[in-house]
Amino acid sequence: MVTDNMRLIPRSFLWRTILMILVPLIIAQVIIANVFFGNHWSRVHATLARSLAVEISTMMNFMDDGNDDAARKMARDMGINVSINSKLNRPSKNDNESREAGLLATELSNRLRRPAQIYIDKAKRLVFIDVPTNDGQIATFGTSLYRIYSTSTEVFIIWLIGSILIVSILITPFIIMHTRSIRRIARAAGRFGRGLDAPGFQPTGSKEIREAAAAMITMKERLNRYNRTRTDMLNAVSHDLKAPLTRMRLAVETDTASKPDLLHDIDRMTEMVNGYLAFARGEIPEIEQTTELPAMLLRIARDAAPDKDIQTDFPVEPAQFYARPMALARAFGNIIENAARYANKTIRITEHDTADQIEIIIEDDGPGIPDDKKRDAMRPFVRLDDARSDKTGGTGLGLSIAQTAIENHGGQMFLENSTLGGLRVRVVLPI
């Protein structure tokens, strides 16, 4: 039974939305119409029927008293045509029980001591009331049908139906536009799921739909970056381990191997493998805690660069925000260790707080990074040794791991030129 009911509900978003708007509107209109017909309509027609019945009853009293002139004068004043006939050619069935004349027939039967026959000419919108007189003739009272029946009923019904049609015409284009935006997102998501791009796809529609589309584009970019990173990692592992292994094999085969050289190569490979594993594992799940950055940054800087001149500029009351402190410590640790590796003498750490974000700036006075290579420096397994130093080593993962941790906190990381002459890393985190 539930399945059968579900089949009656349209599956498309367009028709579900239209029904969601129109069904309550129709129900409201039906309730309004019921209230109107049950109260206003019945009262208005009862008043009209009572008024005409009183007038006819009064004129019949004049006629019964033989005062026909008074009856005719009153009829003229009331807009009623009165005629006395001995015989009339009427239809076999009267309209006493019709919707228009039912109330009037009831009022006349209550006020007159004789039967009254009501006939309606709908084509001419006239009503005729035949009442027998005391002398055996028939008094016919003719007047407009509007004296007993208000056409506002039909007008009201037309407006009810018209309002539903107007609302339907107005809302349908907007719903269609929203539906098209959702369909575009669905098509783009389908292409993204198959590993394809969606050329020309742009967020459109309402704010919520645009946000959903933008989130999907961001997800696609992160997946692409993850795939590129995985490929780069495999290439880096094969490339970076090949050289020391070849050197060690050659040294063993030629009996030129020395213990210090072998240990150096082993330490180097251990460092690279640990770096690859740390990057492949990503972040360990961690509960968010209230965090302040100055103490963390100062501790990391003192541990990473004990021989450097560390300059700090922190707020008197630093901002507190919810974050994963271990993940941030790893991120800022990589950035500060990178600065310590290349700085000549000075490392400067600054924090600027606003109502909705925290900005951390880490600068060094080293050689810096050329502008055309800053983007590459953020990629994993990319080392810019020529731009920095010939003896720096490393696996090229420090800044990439830091960027991933910062983005996982909803922040951004930028590489810029420092006034000290070296690299300026600017991190923006939301509060």
Image (spheres, grey):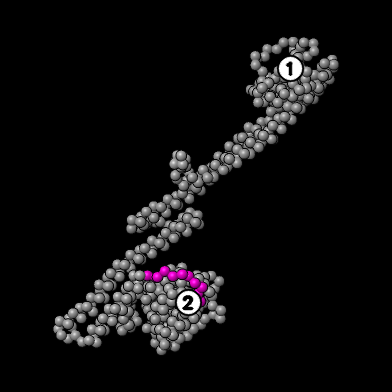
Kind of residue at badge 1: Pro
Residue 106 % position (x, y): 72, 23
Return the mark for residue 115.
Answer: 1
Residue 287 among those drawn in magenta: yes
Specify whether residue 288 is in view.
Answer: yes
For label 2, the SS is strand
Residue 27 in the magenta stretch? The answer is no
Q: Nearer the viewer, residue 175 or 199?
A: 175
Above or below: residue 21 compared with residue 59: below
The image shows residue 18, relative to residue 148, as above or below, that is below
The image quarter containing residue 39 is top right
| Nearer to me, 37 or 384 | 37
Residue stretch rendered in magenta on the structure:
282-293
Examine the image and state in which quarter residue 309 appears.
bottom left
| Of marks 1 and 2, the one in the foreground | 1
Whether residue 144 is situated above or below residue 197 in the rendered picture: above
